[in-house]
Image: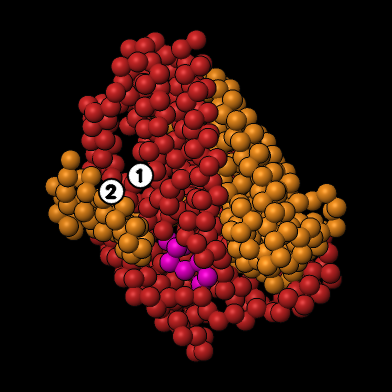
Chain colours: A orange, B red
Amino acid sequence: MLPLLGILVVVLGFALRVNPLLVVACAAMTTGIASGRGPLAVVALLGKAFADSRSVAIVWLALPVIGLLEREGLKERARDIVSRIQAATAGRVLLAYLALRQLTAALGLMSLGGHAQMVRPLVAPMAEAAAEARHGELSEDTRERIRAHAAAVDNIGVFFGEDVFIAIGSILLIRGFLDQNGIHVEPGALALWAIPTAVAAFLIHGARLLLLDRRLRAAARVPNGDEEAAR
Amino acid sequence: MISLELVHTLMGLLFAGIAVVNARDAASPRRWGNAAFWGIYAASFLAGSHLSDLANGVLVFALVGVASTRRMGASRSDDDPREVREARARRWGNRLFVPALTIPAVTLLGAPVLKRATVGGAPLVDPKQVTLVALGTAIVVALVVGIGMLRPPPSAPMREARRLMDSVGWAAALPQLLAALGAVFAAAGIGQIVSTLAARWLPLGTPFAAVATYAVGMALFTIVMGNAFAAFPVMTAGIGLPLVVHRFGGDVTVMAAIGMLSGFCGTLMTPMAANFNIVPIALLELPDQNAVIKAQLPTALFLLAANIGLMYFFVYS
């Protein structure tokens, strides 16, 4: 029971808005010590796990390229292209990216997206530009809402596309775990049963993206662009 | 054999470069806080494989210490004005997309090539890490293509990387630290404790209750751990296999496939999944720490309900 105190530390720390790095380090110490280890042993355990997880941070390696391209006008170019497409709206741009991300992930092409490589330089500016072309200058709230949705689409697209591909980590994990329990399952069958949820994810989130367009239209009709009043 | 060490070294050099640019910027009020953080982070990447576990742990606490002093922050913006960038965008046109799309293209083409490449009979790249090595290689290729095409001042890529990394700040290390916390949780047996508690206190008497508890449990445990992969073995051993499969005769393939996807619904709802939900906040410069989770929350809840329905409908038929 006592090791669960670490979870309490996380919940409290995040709720009280303490620096998240400090919260996580304290949670690790709490749980480690509560499970009967000495403080130095916990520091070593955390240090080993941190060093073993270094590749998690690989996304940052792309920033010199992305920063260089931003300096040369990549975002402006992405905006320019979208604002010339008459039918483009923020919701439709994001819907198209959702479909593309789900389909490519289902084919095993997970690296065709990502927040640093695709969302910041391309998808978010395109969605903002589409909204601007329709509704004129956007309020800061609206702009932030569109950007948050651009990040969300990347997550939802990859999460509910990748499991349709048979060689992805989660399918291998399921298979490995069930093998240990003496149950053999076919990766192809696991991938097949990921399809209903993938379709449901596209329908649910796609509908919400079209609703986002309606909200943007309603917000634009209110003269001061105040979205709260438009609800 | 090329292993992840190559990627770690590249990342260490990037962070060291960012520390140096910060340390040399006498005009920045955050000069030393930023330089210290990126310097320590660089040391962890460059020396991490050679240091003792305890020394690595000390580096972690040094990072946490610097991050907690509030002496870090975005450096003063020396962005070129929008008109300048628009003029450059017109000059380059669609050629600007070439280096950007080089990253996914080279990753996709490079992974199968690297997987087959051998030197003297031994694999050139550690087979388990082919994708990450391919991604690292692709980024280097894209940088070379970008520099060759755009001919920026030599310091531009590092200065731009510094601008972006400083605006991300300490959040850059959060996904990695949360992964480490997951390892500590696992070593402390958190999973066993939670599944014992769930089995004792939750109503599991009907086939539907078993399915709903398994799916919601996957989502909730993922919210706590930040990772569906950590939740899956615990919930499947604790509830899925004994109840859904053995007691009520459900199909294990359907249960496992949809169960994992129920966990992904949890990933959409938790700040613990920092690389998906917190990193984009920093990258897109959003003031609300929960903006991405808020955008995902309705989808996650509807989809979790849909998963329970799908699993109940298909698992027992």
Task: Report whether A48 appears left or right of A40.
Answer: right
What is the x, y in percent for residue B245? 38, 15
Question: Toward the viewer: A170 or A21?
Answer: A21
| Residue A210: quadrant of the picture | top right
What is the x, y in percent for residue B91? 84, 71
| Residue B280: quadrant of the picture | bottom right
Task: Report whether B94 appears left or right of A213.
Answer: right
> What segment carries the magenta color?
B166-173
**Residue B117 visible in the picture:** no
Amino acid carrying mark 2 in the image: Ile
What is the x, y in percent for residue B35? 44, 77
Q: Check disc 1 and report the residue beneath it.
A: B224
Residue at image coords 32%, 24%: B239
**Residue A194 visible in the picture:** yes
Q: Chain of mark 1?
A: B
Above or below, B184 relative to A99:
below
Question: Toward the viewer: B285 or B257?
Answer: B285
Q: Main secondary structure of the magenta part?
A: helix
